[in-house]
Structures are given as structure tokens and as C-alpha cells.
């Protein structure tokens, strides 16, 4: 891939990766969590990252968001090398994420949690339009974001009183509050019912269509194969396959290492049988 310097804003469906991971390796003691991982995430696309538990998906998110320093390799956002930058600097460059284990202020209301994100946005730069007029009114913007993710009814409730699935949506609303150019989602569907997952998939497409780059870690294969433009498969810390959902579905290594194993060994999960 070229090292493009231009930001990907406005590059819906364009060629410039807004997030580039190059040759990243991470070791924990004797465990090689990531080994020579490279991937590109483009504006206007939803990029999937799948792989069995322990494959290194969350570790990769930690490297991209600045919580984990890689032993080797680089991370670029809109062409800028951010490998040495901390999480807050990356957030200001338009990177937002959700966590596999939720990271919210549990005593605060959903609305206040989203306000924290909106406050961060005021100090950031180079944002894409998010909600039109509503975003000029912080209270209204927080509520509108919660409604957008399907958690409007939770606005006044403390996060610790919510079902996990709803709390995940609140965390997504908070991530959206900075109007990210790059959005990392770590298993956003766990705790959601089928109906909510379909709604979330639709939202992810919308976010990509607005020109954002979305990187999705998710075990719900129906959602991944339905929503993603490109899918990477991570296994034991290495990318073993990448391609369109149609290619990934049929890839022999994926069938053997992932789909086959997790769909009762039949290897015939062409319909995107649910995983986990
Ligand atoms: N902070 C850590 N310290 C030690 N080992 C870790 C740490 N984080 C992750 N690991 C190990 O790294 C590997 C990848 O984990 P993880 O990135 O959480 O995988 P995934 O998200 O794909 O399930 C696993 O073997 C895990 O036990
Ligand atoms: Mg994980």
C-alpha cells in the first residue's frame, strides 16, 4: 500500500486507507499475541476482523487506539504515523472505539456518559458533520445520539441499571460523540438480541456511508458477512485471509480454522450460521 498523506475525509469508497496497520507484533511474555499484522481500513467502508477467541483482535484494537505499544510495526491515521502517540492524541485525530468489556461511568446516566464524549469533541478538530443542528445543543445532541443507536429510552437511566446490550449501545453513542473518522467496535453485538443486531448493522452501514471508516470485531457472522465490505481473518496472531465476504465465506483456511470449526465441523456454513 502507498503511504498517502492526504486525509481520507470525503473519500467515500475512495482508495486512501484512513487507518493503516503495518507489520505489527506484540508479545506478552512467551505469548505472541500479534505477529506481523498488516491491514488497511478505508473511509466509506465497514471492515471486519474475525477470528477465534485469543486470536489477538482486542490486542490489535489496543495497539490501534494507543493502549498497547507494539514491539514492532506502525499505525497510521490519515497518513500520519501515530505509533508513538497516546490514546487522547489519537482521539483528537478522529479515532474512537468501544470496548469488549464496557468502559463507561456506571453511576452516571446514559446521557451524561454521551456528554463526556461531546465535551471531548469540542476540543477536537477535523470532524465530519454528525447530526446537523442538534449537535449545537449538547443536551439535545446526547439524546439524539442515544436515539440514533437505538438507546433513546435509556437516556435518563444510570448505566449500571441497564442490560449489557443497551449499555453497549450507550458506549457506541459515546464513541460517536466525537464524530470519529475511524470507529473501532469490539464485539458490539454481544448482549443484543437479533432485532437489535440487525438495527446495529444498518447503523454501521450508515456511518460508513457518511464517510467514516469502521473496523468491526464481531462473532455474529451473519452481521459480519452482511455488513462488511472487506473482512480480515486473524488466527493465532496472524492474518490468515482477507477479502470480500463472499471470498471469506469460501476461503479454505477460514473454513478449516474458523467457520468449519465453529459451525459443528460441517464446514458448510455458507448461509453465515451464527457463531457463539
Ligand atoms: N494484557 C495481557 N497480558 C498477557 N497476555 C495477554 C494480555 N492481553 C491479551 N493476552 C493474550 O494475548 C492473546 C490474544 O488475546 P486477545 O487480543 O484478547 O484476543 P481476542 O480479542 O481475539 O480474543 C491471548 O493469548 C491472550 O491470553
Ligand atoms: Mg477480544
Image (tube, rainbow, N blue to C red):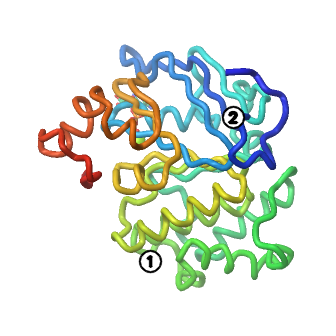
**In front: 156, or 5?**
5
Q: Which residue is drawn at 25% across and 40% down?
A: 259
Q: Quick check: 268 left or right of 186?
A: left
Give the image location of residue 191, x and y in percent.
Answer: 36, 64
- Is residue 29 placed above or below 263 in the rendered structure? above
Mark 1 Cα within 10 Å, few/some/many (few <14, many 20+)? few
Check disc 2 and report its element: helix, strand or loop: strand
User: Which quarter of the image is occupied by the N terminus?
Assistant: top right
- Is residue 216 placed above or below 21 in the rendered structure? below
Give the image location of residue 63, x and y in percent.
Answer: 58, 31
Q: Quick check: 9 left or right of 164?
A: right
- Is residue 106 placed above or below 94 in the rendered structure? below
Mark 2 Cα within 10 Å, few/some/many (few <14, many 20+)? many
Q: Which residue is drawn at 12% across and 44% down?
A: 264
Q: Name the residue under label 2.
A: 17
Check disc 1 and report its element: helix, strand or loop: helix
Q: In the figure, residue 8 lies in which quadrant? A: top right
Mark 2 / mark 1, whichever is N-terminal? 2
Q: In the figure, residue 253 lies in which quadrant? A: top left
Q: Which residue is drawn at 36% across and 14% down?
A: 30
Q: Residue at x 20, y 42 (%)?
A: 262
Question: CA gap, disc 2 to disc 1?
Answer: 39 Å
Q: Quick check: 223 left or right of 142?
A: left
Give the image location of residue 274, x and y in percent.
Answer: 26, 55
Q: Quick check: 182 left or right of 137?
A: left
Give the image location of residue 257, x and y in percent.
Answer: 25, 30
Q: Mark 1 points at which residue?
A: 161
Q: Ligand 1 shows up in which quadrant of the image?
A: top left
Amino acid at each position: 500500500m502507498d503511504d498517502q498523506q492526504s486525509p481520507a475525509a470525503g473519500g467515500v469508497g475512495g482508495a486512501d486507507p484512513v487507518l493503516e496497520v503495518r507489520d505489527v507484533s506484540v508479545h506478552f511474555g512467551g505469548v505472541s499475541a500479534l505477529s506481523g499484522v498488516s491491514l488497511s481500513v478505508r473511509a466509506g467502508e465497514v471492515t471486519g476482523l474475525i477470528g477465534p477467541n485469543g486470536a489477538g483482535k482486542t490486542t490489535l484494537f489496543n495497539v490501534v487506539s494507543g493502549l498497547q505499544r507494539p514491539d514492532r510495526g506502525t499505525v497510521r491515521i490519515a497518513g500520519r504515523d501515530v505509533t508513538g502517540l497516546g490514546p487522547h492524541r489519537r482521539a483528537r485525530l478522529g479515532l474512537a472505539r468501544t470496548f469488549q468489556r464496557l468502559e463507561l461511568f456506571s453511576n452516571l446516566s446514559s446521557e451524561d456518559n454521551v456528554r463526556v464524549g461531546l465535551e471531548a469533541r469540542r476540543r477536537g478538530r477535523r470532524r465530519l458533520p454528525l447530526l446537523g443542528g442538534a449537535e449545537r445543543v449538547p443536551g439535545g445532541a446526547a439524546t439524539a445520539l442515544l436515539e440514533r443507536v437505538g438507546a433513546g429510552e435509556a437516556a435518563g437511566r444510570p448505566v449500571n441499571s441497564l442490560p449489557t446490550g443497551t449499555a453497549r449501545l450507550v458506549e457506541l453513542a459515546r464513541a460517536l460523540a466525537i464524530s470519529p473518522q475511524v470507529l473501532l467496535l469490539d464485539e458490539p453485538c454481544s448482549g443484543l438480541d437479533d432485532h437489535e443486531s440487525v438495527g446495529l448493522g444498518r447503523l454501521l452501514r450508515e456511518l460508513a456511508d457518511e464517510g467514516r471508516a469502521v473496523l468491526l470485531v464481531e462473532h455474529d457472522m451473519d452481521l459480519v458477512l452482511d455488513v462488511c465490505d472487506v473482512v480480515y481473518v486473524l488466527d493465532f496472531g496472524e492474518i490468515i485471509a482477507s477479502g470480500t465476504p463472499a471470498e471469506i465465506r469460501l476461503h479454505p483456511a477460514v473454513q478449516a480454522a474458523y467457520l468449519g470449526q465453529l459451525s459443528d465441523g460441517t464446514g458448510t456454513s455458507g448461509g453465515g450460521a451464527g457463531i457463539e
